[in-house]
Image (cartoon, coloured by chain):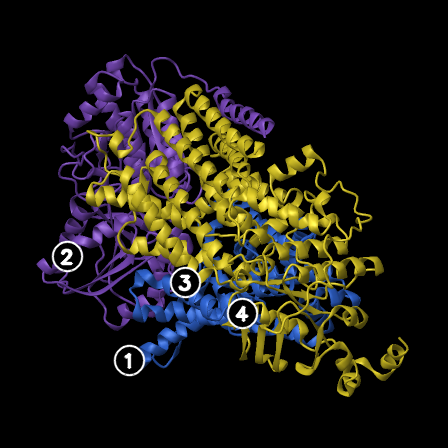
Chain colours: A yellow, B purple, C blue
Amino acid sequence: MPSRARGWLAVAAVVAVGVALTFGVQERYHHRVLTLVFLWAAMGLSWNIISGYAGQISFGHQVFFGIGAYVTVLLIVKAGLTPWIGMIVAIGVAVLAAVLIGMPTFRLAGIYFGLATLAYPLIFRIVMDWLGFQEVAIPMKREQPGWFMQFSDPRSFDLLALAVLAATLMLSRAIETSRLGYRLRAIRENEQAAEAMGVDSFRCKMIAYMLSAAPAAVVGAVYVHAILFIVTPEAVFGLLVVSQTLVVCLVGGTGTLWGPVIGAALMVPASEILDTTVGDRLPGIQGVVYGGALILIMLYAPEGLYWRARQLLLGRAGRGTDAARSAVVAPAQDGAAAVAPMDRALLEVRGVSKAFSGLQALSDVSFDAREREILGVIGPNGAGKTTLFNVLNGFLAPDVGQVRFLGHDATGQRPSALCRLGVGRTFQVPRTFPHLTLSENVMIGAFVHVRPVPDARRLAHAALGRVGLADRADALPSGLTTLDLRLMELARCLATEPRLVLLDEPLAGLSGDGVAVMIGAIRSVRSLGATVVIIEHTMQALLSLADRLIVLDQGRRLAEGTPTQVTQDPAVIEAYLGKRWLARMGGR
Amino acid sequence: MRRLSRMLAVGLAVTLIAPALLIKPAPAAEDVRIALVVPLSGRWARQGQLKKMGADMAIEEINSQGGIKALGGAKIVLREADAGDSVEKAVSAAQRVLTREKISAGIGSWLSSFTLGVTEVAERQQVPWLSLSYADSITERGFKFTFQTSPVSSLQAEQALDLVTDLAKKSNRPIKKAGIVGDNTAASMFFYKPLREKLLAAKGIELIVDDVWTPPLADATAIVQKLRSNPPDIVFYGATNFPDSIQVLQKVKEFGVKSPIQGVGAWLVTPEYVKTVGKDVLDNIQTVVAAHPMKGQEELVKKFKARTGEPFMTQDPLCTYSHVWLIKEAIEQAKSADPKAIRDALARIDISSGPAVAAFYPPRVKFDERGRRVGAMPIIVQWQDGEPYTVVPTAVATRPVAWHK
Amino acid sequence: MGAAELVQYVATGVLVGGVYALMSIGLALIFGVMRVVNFAQGDFMMLGMYLTYFYTLSGVVDPLLGALLTIPPFFVLGWIVHRGLLARVTGGGDPQRQMDAQLILTLGLSLVITNATTMILSPTPLGIRTPYATQAFALGPVLLNQARSYAFGMALLLALAVYGFLTRTDLGKALRAAADDPEAASYQGIDVRAMHGLAFGTGIALVAAAGGLLATYHPIEPTVAGNFIVLMFVAVVLGGLGSIPGAFVGGLVIGLVQSLTLLVLPFQLQNTGVFIVFLLVLYLRPQGLFGRRARTV
């Protein structure tokens, strides 16, 4: 793919520029600045993997940096081990730490995760002091300086740091263009929707965290050899490291390769210049500039300079398509007559109850969904319909009861696991991944069964084509009508190749034309061989669409049967339909 | 993409070339440059500035007395570099100052972690470096260019213990129980270690309190409570972090703890203490330091106070003053401003008089093969009436010691 | 260890915790209403300490009174900071992004305040000398430091005042409505942005007052925030992000944990006790003691 080759070429260009600068810069101090630029860019990139791509903002990334520094130096001091090998050990320790930290901490959402990450470096600092490692000097090895990373020529450090940067750039690029990269972005955009589309968010976050720990450890090891010469807990686990990392990434741009590179290239030399020129008259000027940069960025370019520049340079690309009218294209297959529901139960719900702090949302609900049928779920507001769906697709675990899917017990499993088993879902309010194009949105679904990115893209295009959105594949969701969004969500769900599709009020907010298109699409779902369970408010639509209906009222199953049976059930009329409705319908 | 990385390259190049354009005025060709890498801004700015005051005073004296004779009256010029408040800044400052100009020798950097980092740079650049830091680790690295004039912490522990047990015996209050109270910064830890491991036991003294914390200290009650319920005969006190120290001293006053307090380091000798807790709390508290104005140095102290307006002269300016003179003497002996020649001269030097030994006790500077001053002994300083005075050894005391009020 | 000693440990922990509690209430209020974790909270406290010091320089103002006098100017400062900076951050329209952006903004603010103070004021520590800093009330064998006791008392009074304001006044109820459901509140005619400004201003004023109280026994320097900001976070999470009484209890608990950790861990690991409690709370009961159910994945 041309864009992929362009990406690698750009990485090579950065490396080339780095090499040129290494041999062009004369003064020793300038070499130090250059080394710092490379190292902080690499550190920023490593933070970016977990906090930029995956959106899990960590305030404790310096843990891995410090581990890299301490492990390599302590191995030299205690075992005489060369840091070239010591670094590899350090990577191992850092990745292990990532697992140990990530396992409990990723269960926390949003700000709690960030706050928890604050604690670990502080604990490390105290423990290092306690163990007696307040000041560990790197023993000077005069006989084998290169073997111990003690170069006298500063250019060697520049090249070493550049190599670390290059490796981290390649790692980031590899992630960006892989299935993991797309999944991480989906998690960042909307974790719940990602889960429903088969993305095991915990596992993806853990992998990202481990991948982010390794470069950070290497940066720490090189930093202490090139810049510090001694290791103190404050210097490697302290606030300066994390604020430098954050500034570099946030100013440059998160979620992209270029952000940390731009951020480091701007902020590091700026702060060094300030420090050397006015640092003694204005102590702390560096901190003021960093803080000021963060504030300005958040006010005027919250995604970072890279995205802002891109937006300004490329214009409002991706939003250009006119959002006024959606092309009302009837979806390809309408095999309503051809496919009949079977008798075998695909989904068995037995005695499911769910309560929320005193409110009984579901009460002993039992029913079956038969293969290839369209089962409607209706009931007044608050009847528990969406709660039922949340139980069926794994967002909630029932207090009591069982859900069996394809004969296996599916109660309480993760949504992503259920998705991989074949349970697909759309949401009452469409949950898109707002910064991904329609094609990329649908690819997330395709990734359940397919790994290579080009294959997923092909499947996504095909799925969009089936719902008539092929021409909008590269548009962002923000410009689309409700109908198009729902069709996209359906395409995304279908890309996961589900056996069971849960549709939560797919007709809400649609006009007459839109309803017709949507109904056609739903019928075509069945023709693909899937079972549909659909929550709807508008009775008319369901009457013609559904094979069977279930009525819920106040968490209880009120009735179950064909539309005719259900609409004539007095209990249903009493609770939900009302006699006037019946009278009105009687005339049809 | 291409455009962006081109812009990137240009931006990088510009920001890196800019500092080279900052021109520094070059000193006269014959001047000898001495680097001073100390904190001049941030948390420890005060200490760094005190050192600079000492250095400035020495340089003025040397230059006004005809400069360096062996180099035809060459003047000394100070090149100070701000170590800031982090190891990275200190090392960066050292690299900058040592690579931009020809520096003959250097002094610094107050905090032992800064000194460790800075001397690594000096060793690589092969520039001799003088430090007053106490930590043993400074001269345990096999370096050739690092010279440590203060007695190392472990040695100070031994000598200080001898001095105080002597004092106690003379006052008929022999020491049977001791306490260690302080933080876990490196220099302090190097002091406690030999005490705990052998020195106290060797004198038959029982260690009844051993409370070492990681700064910052939340509350001193638990520690001082122990001192109150079972008072030791001497408390070795290493709270280098000012807020922690204030809390402990206030608590000592509040709980009425009477045990003599023997500080470990010059951090206990600053005017800020008097301003913050007042002289009543400080009275009779002692501390072990590497240097303090001794008997016979009244002129020097007066000159310093007049120049700077400081209420008293302490270890930092005094040592730095002597360091500069010591470098001058080394240059005279080496007859050259070349750093390697100066280093060799310092390695051979054996000097017992003049301003170069003003700060040291006993007044002799000769370095061993590790770079440590041979025969170095600490001074004990005691707060009396809101000012710190040298009390031990009595030969150089400026006031008699007050032991057990 | 005797009972008297144990009581002393507990008493120390409670007194220290009282001031932590006051510091934390401000943070909890800001988070509760605006869903913003204010990283600059400790720095505003540091500014409050300096202002109190300047009041005492006059010779007639006792630092306890000085602490109270920091409330009006810091309320105004908080309001201005909110209006001028925080309210202008939109994060591109997405509420989650907006919260993240506001959080980063407070981080930037923290860096600016600490470093600007270092630039403008001397970094040398300052201290306020009061007679009661070195005196204690004796309750039997237990000694209660007078400065800390007064600080505790004032912290309690201020916390009660805030609580009363929030629960019993109309303005307080409007504030809580804006916190619970901004959309519904705005339909009721409540100016949500003004409520945010009110919350921020109050939160800053409270922590500045806490700083003034702290200054009665703790030296003042530009970097003092660093020691306390994490303790504040821990206290607030412990109590439940957004709960005022929770934050108060959380602060007391942190003080106790710090004190009682010394009974089980070596002194050098004193603060690890706090961090371990922090992590345990986050894992086992992220909504804290009093908070509503936290969203977990």
Please tell me which residue is depicted at 32% across the width and 22% down the height of the picture: B103
Q: Give the Cα separation between the discs numbered 2 and 3.
A: 32 Å
Residue C280: tell me if it is visible: yes
Mark number for residue C275? 3
* Residue A406, disc: 4
Identify the residue at horizontal 16%, vertical 53% (top origin). Answer: B194
Report which quarter residue B366 is drawn in.
Answer: top left
Query: How many marks on residues?
Result: 4
Label 1: which residue? C2
Q: Which of the two marks, 1 or 3, is nearer to us in this view?
A: 3
| Residue A85, above or below B56 | below
- Tell me the subunit letter for badge 1: C
Label 3 crowd bin: few (<14), some (14–19), many (20+), radius 10 Å: many
Q: Where is residue A272 shown, x and y percent of the image?
A: 48, 32
Neighbours of disc 4 within 10 Å: few (<14), some (14-19), many (20+): some
Residue B221's quadrant in the figure? bottom left
Kindly identify the amino acid type of the residue bearing the numbered disc 2. Glu
Instruction: Measure the C-alpha gap from mark 1 to mark 2.
Output: 30 Å
Q: Quadrant of residue A1?
A: top right
- Residue A254 visible (yes or no): no
Disc 2 packing (10 Å; few <14; some 14–19; many ≥20): few
Task: Say which residue label 2 marks.
Answer: B197
The spot of residue C201 in percent (x, y) is 65, 59
Q: Secondary structure at mark 1?
A: loop
Q: Amino acid at mark 4?
A: Leu
Please state the chain letter of the residue tagged with numbered disc 2 in the rendered image: B
Q: Closer to us: mark 4 or mark 1?
A: 4
Query: Residues at badges 4 and 2 in contact (C-beta under 8 Å)?
Result: no
Spatial CA distance of label 4 from label 1 is 66 Å
Residue at mark 3: chain: C
- Residue A14 screen position, x and y as percent: 49, 28
